[in-house]
Image (cartoon, rainbow, N blue to C red):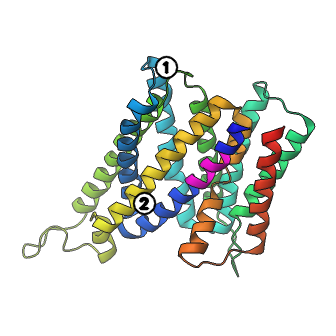
Protein backbone atom coordinates (compact mmCIF):
# COMPACT_ATOMS: atom_id res chain seq x y z
CA UNK A 1 0.00 0.00 0.00
CA UNK A 2 2.77 2.43 0.93
CA UNK A 3 4.60 2.04 -2.37
CA UNK A 4 1.42 2.77 -4.38
CA UNK A 5 0.70 5.92 -2.41
CA UNK A 6 4.30 7.12 -2.66
CA UNK A 7 4.39 6.32 -6.39
CA UNK A 8 1.27 8.37 -7.04
CA UNK A 9 2.49 11.21 -4.81
CA UNK A 10 5.85 11.15 -6.57
CA UNK A 11 4.09 11.43 -9.93
CA UNK A 12 2.28 14.60 -8.85
CA UNK A 13 5.52 16.08 -7.49
CA UNK A 14 7.30 15.24 -10.77
CA UNK A 15 4.48 16.97 -12.63
CA UNK A 16 4.83 20.04 -10.41
CA UNK A 17 8.57 20.09 -11.11
CA UNK A 18 7.87 19.92 -14.84
CA UNK A 19 5.44 22.82 -14.51
CA UNK A 20 8.07 25.03 -12.88
CA UNK A 21 10.66 23.79 -15.36
CA UNK A 22 8.42 24.84 -18.24
CA UNK A 23 8.02 28.32 -16.77
CA UNK A 24 11.75 28.64 -16.17
CA UNK A 25 12.60 27.41 -19.67
CA UNK A 26 10.69 30.35 -21.13
CA UNK A 27 13.09 32.68 -19.33
CA UNK A 28 16.50 31.00 -19.36
CA UNK A 29 16.07 28.14 -21.86
CA UNK A 30 15.62 24.40 -21.30
CA UNK A 31 19.32 23.52 -21.01
CA UNK A 32 20.04 26.08 -18.32
CA UNK A 33 16.80 25.21 -16.56
CA UNK A 34 17.86 21.57 -16.33
CA UNK A 35 21.39 22.49 -15.25
CA UNK A 36 20.25 24.90 -12.52
CA UNK A 37 17.65 22.40 -11.33
CA UNK A 38 20.29 19.69 -11.05
CA UNK A 39 22.42 21.84 -8.74
CA UNK A 40 19.42 22.87 -6.60
CA UNK A 41 18.38 19.24 -6.25
CA UNK A 42 21.91 18.24 -5.29
CA UNK A 43 21.95 20.82 -2.48
CA UNK A 44 18.65 19.46 -1.12
CA UNK A 45 19.91 15.88 -1.18
CA UNK A 46 23.14 16.84 0.60
CA UNK A 47 21.06 18.53 3.32
CA UNK A 48 18.87 15.41 3.56
CA UNK A 49 21.85 13.03 3.80
CA UNK A 50 22.42 13.41 7.58
CA UNK A 51 18.68 12.93 8.18
CA UNK A 52 18.00 10.05 5.79
CA UNK A 53 21.46 8.52 5.85
CA UNK A 54 22.88 5.96 3.48
CA UNK A 55 25.85 3.64 3.06
CA UNK A 56 28.49 4.81 0.62
CA UNK A 57 29.51 1.96 -1.66
CA UNK A 58 30.71 1.35 -5.19
CA UNK A 59 27.31 -0.12 -6.08
CA UNK A 60 25.40 2.89 -4.73
CA UNK A 61 27.63 5.38 -6.52
CA UNK A 62 27.84 3.36 -9.73
CA UNK A 63 24.09 2.77 -10.14
CA UNK A 64 23.43 6.35 -9.11
CA UNK A 65 25.82 7.75 -11.71
CA UNK A 66 24.30 5.51 -14.40
CA UNK A 67 20.83 6.73 -13.49
CA UNK A 68 22.13 10.29 -13.84
CA UNK A 69 23.36 9.57 -17.36
CA UNK A 70 20.05 7.96 -18.31
CA UNK A 71 18.10 10.86 -16.81
CA UNK A 72 20.13 13.49 -18.65
CA UNK A 73 19.66 11.73 -22.01
CA UNK A 74 15.93 11.30 -21.31
CA UNK A 75 15.44 15.00 -20.54
CA UNK A 76 17.38 16.09 -23.63
CA UNK A 77 15.31 13.81 -25.89
CA UNK A 78 12.07 14.88 -24.20
CA UNK A 79 12.72 18.59 -24.68
CA UNK A 80 13.82 17.97 -28.27
CA UNK A 81 10.71 16.06 -29.30
CA UNK A 82 8.31 18.41 -27.52
CA UNK A 83 9.95 21.36 -29.26
CA UNK A 84 8.99 19.79 -32.60
CA UNK A 85 5.46 18.83 -31.45
CA UNK A 86 2.62 18.28 -31.34
CA UNK A 87 2.76 17.91 -27.56
CA UNK A 88 -0.77 16.49 -27.46
CA UNK A 89 0.54 13.29 -29.04
CA UNK A 90 4.19 13.17 -28.02
CA UNK A 91 3.71 13.81 -24.29
CA UNK A 92 1.36 10.88 -23.59
CA UNK A 93 3.41 8.67 -25.92
CA UNK A 94 6.54 9.39 -23.87
CA UNK A 95 4.72 8.75 -20.58
CA UNK A 96 3.24 5.50 -21.86
CA UNK A 97 6.60 4.15 -23.07
CA UNK A 98 8.22 5.24 -19.78
CA UNK A 99 5.78 2.89 -18.03
CA UNK A 100 5.86 -0.01 -20.49
CA UNK A 101 9.66 -0.46 -20.40
CA UNK A 102 10.02 -1.04 -16.63
CA UNK A 103 6.68 -2.91 -16.48
CA UNK A 104 8.01 -5.40 -19.03
CA UNK A 105 11.30 -5.64 -17.15
CA UNK A 106 9.52 -6.16 -13.83
CA UNK A 107 7.15 -8.84 -15.14
CA UNK A 108 10.02 -10.69 -16.81
CA UNK A 109 11.96 -10.40 -13.56
CA UNK A 110 9.19 -12.06 -11.55
CA UNK A 111 6.74 -9.37 -10.43
CA UNK A 112 3.32 -10.99 -10.00
CA UNK A 113 -0.12 -9.71 -9.00
CA UNK A 114 -3.60 -10.86 -8.16
CA UNK A 115 -6.08 -10.51 -11.09
CA UNK A 116 -7.27 -7.17 -9.69
CA UNK A 117 -3.68 -5.96 -9.78
CA UNK A 118 -3.32 -6.60 -13.50
CA UNK A 119 -6.66 -4.87 -14.09
CA UNK A 120 -5.40 -1.88 -12.08
CA UNK A 121 -2.17 -1.74 -14.11
CA UNK A 122 -4.15 -1.65 -17.34
CA UNK A 123 -6.41 1.04 -15.90
CA UNK A 124 -3.38 3.10 -14.89
CA UNK A 125 -1.88 2.86 -18.39
CA UNK A 126 -5.15 4.15 -19.85
CA UNK A 127 -5.07 6.97 -17.30
CA UNK A 128 -1.52 7.86 -18.38
CA UNK A 129 -2.68 8.46 -21.95
CA UNK A 130 -5.83 10.36 -20.95
CA UNK A 131 -4.06 12.65 -18.47
CA UNK A 132 -1.33 13.54 -20.96
CA UNK A 133 -3.74 14.11 -23.84
CA UNK A 134 -4.29 17.78 -24.65
CA UNK A 135 -6.73 18.22 -27.55
CA UNK A 136 -5.58 20.75 -30.10
CA UNK A 137 -7.68 22.03 -32.96
CA UNK A 138 -6.01 21.28 -36.26
CA UNK A 139 -3.14 19.43 -34.61
CA UNK A 140 -0.53 18.38 -37.13
CA UNK A 141 0.62 14.82 -37.60
CA UNK A 142 3.94 14.29 -35.80
CA UNK A 143 7.09 13.87 -37.83
CA UNK A 144 8.80 10.51 -37.81
CA UNK A 145 11.84 12.10 -36.17
CA UNK A 146 9.71 13.47 -33.33
CA UNK A 147 7.99 10.11 -32.79
CA UNK A 148 11.34 8.31 -32.64
CA UNK A 149 12.68 10.81 -30.10
CA UNK A 150 9.50 10.55 -28.00
CA UNK A 151 9.77 6.77 -27.86
CA UNK A 152 13.49 7.04 -27.07
CA UNK A 153 12.81 9.59 -24.31
CA UNK A 154 10.19 7.33 -22.75
CA UNK A 155 12.50 4.34 -23.01
CA UNK A 156 15.32 6.23 -21.28
CA UNK A 157 12.98 7.32 -18.48
CA UNK A 158 12.07 3.65 -18.10
CA UNK A 159 15.77 2.73 -18.02
CA UNK A 160 16.28 5.38 -15.33
CA UNK A 161 13.62 3.67 -13.20
CA UNK A 162 15.14 0.23 -13.77
CA UNK A 163 18.61 1.44 -12.82
CA UNK A 164 17.37 3.18 -9.69
CA UNK A 165 15.66 -0.06 -8.68
CA UNK A 166 19.08 -1.77 -8.69
CA UNK A 167 20.53 0.44 -5.94
CA UNK A 168 21.36 -1.25 -2.61
CA UNK A 169 18.64 -1.13 0.04
CA UNK A 170 20.99 0.41 2.60
CA UNK A 171 22.28 3.16 0.29
CA UNK A 172 19.72 5.80 1.36
CA UNK A 173 20.07 8.98 -0.72
CA UNK A 174 23.64 8.20 -1.83
CA UNK A 175 22.57 7.00 -5.32
CA UNK A 176 20.52 10.16 -5.80
CA UNK A 177 23.51 12.31 -4.85
CA UNK A 178 25.62 10.49 -7.45
CA UNK A 179 22.74 10.93 -9.90
CA UNK A 180 22.62 14.68 -9.37
CA UNK A 181 26.40 15.09 -9.53
CA UNK A 182 26.49 13.28 -12.88
CA UNK A 183 23.45 15.14 -14.20
CA UNK A 184 24.78 18.56 -13.17
CA UNK A 185 28.22 17.89 -14.63
CA UNK A 186 26.74 16.76 -17.95
CA UNK A 187 24.24 19.60 -18.27
CA UNK A 188 26.66 22.40 -17.34
CA UNK A 189 29.19 20.95 -19.78
CA UNK A 190 26.55 21.02 -22.52
CA UNK A 191 25.57 24.59 -21.59
CA UNK A 192 29.20 25.70 -21.76
CA UNK A 193 29.68 24.06 -25.16
CA UNK A 194 26.51 25.68 -26.54
CA UNK A 195 27.56 29.14 -25.29
CA UNK A 196 31.10 28.82 -26.67
CA UNK A 197 29.82 27.63 -30.05
CA UNK A 198 27.26 30.42 -30.20
CA UNK A 199 29.90 33.03 -29.50
CA UNK A 200 32.41 31.55 -31.95
CA UNK A 201 29.89 31.72 -34.81
CA UNK A 202 29.29 35.45 -34.41
CA UNK A 203 31.85 37.99 -35.69
CA UNK A 204 33.12 40.44 -33.08
CA UNK A 205 31.80 43.98 -33.46
CA UNK A 206 34.59 46.33 -32.45
CA UNK A 207 32.14 48.82 -31.02
CA UNK A 208 29.74 46.53 -29.23
CA UNK A 209 31.50 43.27 -28.42
CA UNK A 210 31.23 39.62 -29.51
CA UNK A 211 27.52 39.22 -28.77
CA UNK A 212 26.44 42.15 -30.92
CA UNK A 213 25.59 39.93 -33.88
CA UNK A 214 23.37 37.58 -31.89
CA UNK A 215 19.61 37.75 -32.17
CA UNK A 216 17.64 38.88 -29.13
CA UNK A 217 16.45 35.32 -28.49
CA UNK A 218 20.00 34.00 -28.65
CA UNK A 219 21.24 36.69 -26.25
CA UNK A 220 18.41 35.96 -23.82
CA UNK A 221 19.30 32.26 -23.95
CA UNK A 222 22.86 33.13 -22.86
CA UNK A 223 21.72 35.06 -19.77
CA UNK A 224 20.88 33.64 -16.36
CA UNK A 225 17.90 35.84 -15.55
CA UNK A 226 17.35 35.95 -11.79
CA UNK A 227 13.66 35.07 -11.68
CA UNK A 228 14.21 32.25 -14.16
CA UNK A 229 16.98 30.83 -11.98
CA UNK A 230 14.73 30.93 -8.92
CA UNK A 231 11.91 29.14 -10.72
CA UNK A 232 14.35 26.56 -12.13
CA UNK A 233 15.77 26.03 -8.64
CA UNK A 234 12.27 25.43 -7.29
CA UNK A 235 11.70 22.89 -10.04
CA UNK A 236 14.98 21.19 -9.19
CA UNK A 237 14.04 20.95 -5.51
CA UNK A 238 10.71 19.36 -6.42
CA UNK A 239 12.36 16.99 -8.87
CA UNK A 240 14.84 15.83 -6.22
CA UNK A 241 11.95 15.36 -3.77
CA UNK A 242 10.11 13.27 -6.36
CA UNK A 243 13.25 11.18 -6.91
CA UNK A 244 13.44 10.51 -3.18
CA UNK A 245 9.76 9.50 -3.04
CA UNK A 246 10.33 7.24 -6.04
CA UNK A 247 13.36 5.59 -4.45
CA UNK A 248 11.49 4.90 -1.22
CA UNK A 249 8.53 3.53 -3.18
CA UNK A 250 10.81 1.18 -5.11
CA UNK A 251 12.29 -0.16 -1.88
CA UNK A 252 8.88 -0.69 -0.33
CA UNK A 253 7.19 -2.20 -3.38
CA UNK A 254 7.84 -3.50 -6.87
CA UNK A 255 9.15 -1.84 -10.03
CA UNK A 256 6.04 -2.62 -12.09
CA UNK A 257 3.56 -0.84 -9.82
CA UNK A 258 5.78 2.16 -9.07
CA UNK A 259 6.75 2.75 -12.71
CA UNK A 260 3.12 2.80 -13.91
CA UNK A 261 2.06 5.24 -11.20
CA UNK A 262 5.11 7.43 -11.77
CA UNK A 263 4.16 7.71 -15.45
CA UNK A 264 1.13 9.70 -14.32
CA UNK A 265 3.43 12.71 -13.81
CA UNK A 266 1.55 14.85 -16.41
CA UNK A 267 -1.32 15.04 -13.89
CA UNK A 268 0.62 17.41 -11.64
CA UNK A 269 1.47 19.66 -14.56
CA UNK A 270 -2.13 19.68 -15.78
CA UNK A 271 -3.57 20.57 -12.37
CA UNK A 272 -1.06 23.35 -11.70
CA UNK A 273 -1.58 24.80 -15.16
CA UNK A 274 -5.32 24.85 -14.46
CA UNK A 275 -4.96 26.52 -11.06
CA UNK A 276 -2.05 28.91 -11.68
CA UNK A 277 -2.31 29.69 -15.38
CA UNK A 278 -6.08 29.21 -15.65
CA UNK A 279 -5.59 26.73 -18.46
CA UNK A 280 -8.62 24.66 -19.35
CA UNK A 281 -8.55 21.01 -18.30
CA UNK A 282 -10.30 18.89 -20.91
CA UNK A 283 -12.99 16.42 -19.75
CA UNK A 284 -10.85 13.55 -21.03
CA UNK A 285 -8.06 14.67 -18.69
CA UNK A 286 -10.41 14.80 -15.69
CA UNK A 287 -11.46 11.27 -16.59
CA UNK A 288 -7.81 10.25 -16.63
CA UNK A 289 -7.24 11.78 -13.19
CA UNK A 290 -10.19 9.86 -11.75
CA UNK A 291 -8.96 6.62 -13.34
CA UNK A 292 -5.50 7.27 -11.90
CA UNK A 293 -6.85 7.56 -8.37
CA UNK A 294 -8.97 4.42 -8.81
CA UNK A 295 -6.01 2.49 -10.23
CA UNK A 296 -3.77 3.60 -7.36
CA UNK A 297 -6.37 2.50 -4.82
CA UNK A 298 -6.70 -0.91 -6.49
CA UNK A 299 -2.93 -1.35 -6.63
CA UNK A 300 -2.65 -0.39 -2.98
CA UNK A 301 -4.94 -3.23 -1.90
CA UNK A 302 -3.87 -5.84 -4.47
* Left-right relation of 254 to 197: right
Place residue 132 in its image quadrant: bottom right
Residue indicated by mark 1: 59
Residue indicated by mark 2: 30
Instruction: Examine the rendered structure and indicate whether residue 58 appears above or below residue 248.
Output: above
Q: Position of residue 35 (x, y in %)?
A: 37, 51
Instruction: Examine the rendered structure and indicate whether residue 259 appears above or below residue 20.
Output: above
Q: Position of residue 67 (x, y in %)?
A: 51, 35
Task: Give the secondary structure at mark 1.
Answer: helix
**Residue toward you, 191 or 135:** 135
**Residue toward you, 43 or 18:** 43
Is residue 11 magenta-colored? Answer: yes
In what quadrant of the picture does the N terminus appear? top right
Magenta-drawn segment? 7-13
Q: Pointers 2 and 1 in contact (CB under 8 A)? A: no
Distance between the alpha carbons at the discs numbered 2 and 1:
31 Å
**Residue toward you, 187 or 121:** 121
Instruction: Examine the rendered structure and indicate whether residue 177 appears above or below residue 84.
Output: above
**Residue toward you, 151 or 171:** 171
In what quadrant of the picture does the C terminus appear? top right
Amino acid sequence: MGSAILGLLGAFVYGSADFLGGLAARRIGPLRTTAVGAVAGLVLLLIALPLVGGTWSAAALGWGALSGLAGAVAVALLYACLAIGPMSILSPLTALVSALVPVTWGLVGGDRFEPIGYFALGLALVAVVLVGFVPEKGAVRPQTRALVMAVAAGAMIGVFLIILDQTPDDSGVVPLIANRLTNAAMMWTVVAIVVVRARSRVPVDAGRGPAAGLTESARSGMRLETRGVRIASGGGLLDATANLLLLIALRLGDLTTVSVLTALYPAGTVLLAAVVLRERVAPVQWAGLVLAIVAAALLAVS
